[in-house]
Image: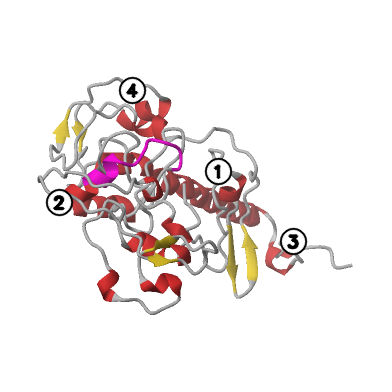
Amino acid sequence: MIPPSISKAIVIAAAPGEILPNFPEPLHVFNPRENQLTVVVDDKKFISSCRWIDSAPYRTITVRDAISDLPEITNGAKNETSSYAKDPVTHYQKMMRGNQKVLLDHICKEMAPIVVARIAHIPTLSGSDWRDLPNIVVRLSDDTYTQKLQYTHRDKNNKIGIYRGVCSCADGKPCNPSDRQYNTLIPWCLPHTGNRNNNWAGLYGKLEWDGFFSTTTTNPEPMSKQGRVLHPEQTRVVSVRECARSQGFKDSYQFYGNILDKHRQVGNAVPPPLGIAIGREILKSVYKKEQYNSCKDEVPESKHVSFEKQPLYDTS
């Protein structure tokens, strides 16, 4: 669930004399590229102890598996308690609901009229994002109109001389503040700097029903580094409860404060299933240490073997 653009590090350590816990084995299969639990420190590459690299017992939990049972809401929905309206249709949904009867925190941030218009014009296609926005004039919910984005400069990388730049920097000159355009359906800043930022792939991106959640951040914003935060079909950003589902919080878990506080609590948290898995590995290490000490107490001192002094491999 963690794309290369935003990573979260989990460090497992042990004091001298203790048994280092293993990293939990993956339970759900992902693209092999996403499964590579490696890190490079000082030009040294460290690989996890996981044995399951190319497979896992269960398939990926998709966005559909996680949130398709939640009722439809609109931009800026504020009702902190509501009804489910649908029965759970997947094992994950049943597990998240448990015995919960009332749906909590299915609320979402209220976005500005121009942001809502942009969301409405993103197609519901796999991988869609801001690059799929039409360059048109639209009427907003506050009865104002957007402007059409003007391409005013030739792109120095464009050999046929088509005007695709929105600032003088497109043809190698310094940026000119007067080139900036406002209130356009295609945000001016994205084509302005897209060539040096991977075309801002994913910004204003819609979640895919058959895909999976990217990193859950503390503030879902379509223009943030992790901008794939739009509901697959509804004209809004993801709700607090949808983000909580993406992290594995059961529906009975209640968050506190305003909506930004709740998003921050979800985004900053270690996903509960991961916390459980790491806790089990720690318990295994504690049990191994107790078993070792128990066996050592049963052996005469003269016959004790110091495992710390044994070589890790045959050096003969």
The residue pinned by badge 3 equals: 303
Give the residue furthest to the bottom. Answer: 174
State the CA–CA distance, disc 1 to disc 2. 34 Å
Q: Earlier in the sequence, mark 3 or mark 1?
A: 1
| Residue drawn 77% across the image and 66% down it | 311
Q: Which residues are magenta?
A: 116-127
Toward which corner of the image does residue 57 lie, by quadrant?
A: top right
Whether the residues at callouts 2 and 3 have beta carbons within 8 Å, the answer is no
Question: Residue 258 has which mark?
Answer: 2
* Residues tagged 4 and 1 counted as in contact (Cβ below 8 A): no
Where residue 103 appears, as percent x and y from the top left, is 21, 31
Local SS, label 1: loop
Q: Mark 2: which amino acid?
A: Asn
Say which residue appears at 56% left-offset and 39% top-offset.
29
Q: Which residue is mark 4?
A: 88
Q: In this view of the protein, which residue sits in the foreground, 87 or 285?
A: 87
Disc 3: CA contacts within 10 A as few (<14), some (14-19) or many (>=20): few
